[in-house]
Image (tube, grey):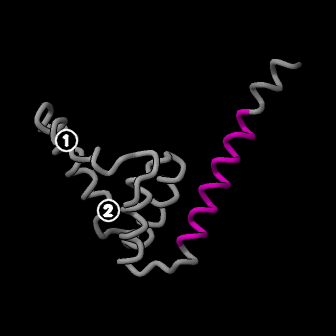
Amino acid sequence: MQEYHYDKEGLKYLKTLGNLKKEQLESFSDFNNKAFAEGAIPPKYKELIAIAAAHITRCPYCIEGHTRRAKENGATDEEIAEAIFVAVAMNAGASIAHASIAMKVLA
């Protein structure tokens, strides 16, 4: 991964988190592995969902990792781009929905 806002070197510090709270980090890892395991939704589609979610949560590590895994699971560049635009639409929709709060203040 190139350096964006997050430094890839920073990931090494997650070892400290694991040393401090090993059970919780292992539980997260187990849950994450189960969430992405083969199931009713094939891995390719889970990875496309993850790409969209990663764009909404703005996690560069997740964007890179899930894009790589989506490609490994057969996703096309066009499918990945489309998943990103679904995320853009969802994020914009949330902003529009929250506009009702500002409009209520103006009323």
What residue span does the magenta drawing correspond to?
Answer: 80-98
Say whether residue 83 is left or right of residue 22. right
Q: Nearer the viewer, mark 1 or mark 2?
A: 1
* Residue labelled with disc 2: 36
In this view, the residue in front, 78 or 105, is: 78
Say whether residue 63 is left or right of residue 27. right
Q: Residues within 10 Å of mark 1 (few under 14, many from 20)?
A: some
Residue 88: give x, y in percent of width and height. 64, 55
Q: Is residue 97 magenta?
A: yes
* Residue labelled with disc 1: 25
In this view, the residue in front, 25 or 10, is: 10
Residue type at numbered disc 2: Phe
Hey, which quadrant is residue 102 in on the image?
Answer: top right
Which SS class for mark 2?
A: loop
Label pair 1/2, CB-CB below 8 angstroms:
no
Which SS class for mark 1?
A: helix
Q: Residue at x 40, y 59 (%)?
A: 2
Hey, which quadrant is residue 98 in on the image?
Answer: top right
Residue type at numbered disc 1: Leu
Quadrant showing the C terminus? top right
In this view, the residue in front, 19 or 102, is: 19
Q: Is residue 52 above or below residue 10?
A: below
Quadrant showing the N terminus? bottom left
CA gap, disc 1 and disc 2: 17 Å
Q: Is residue 26 above or below residue 103?
A: below
- Tell which circle, 1 or 2, labels the residue nearer the N-terminal end: 1
Residue 76: give x, y in percent of width and height. 50, 80
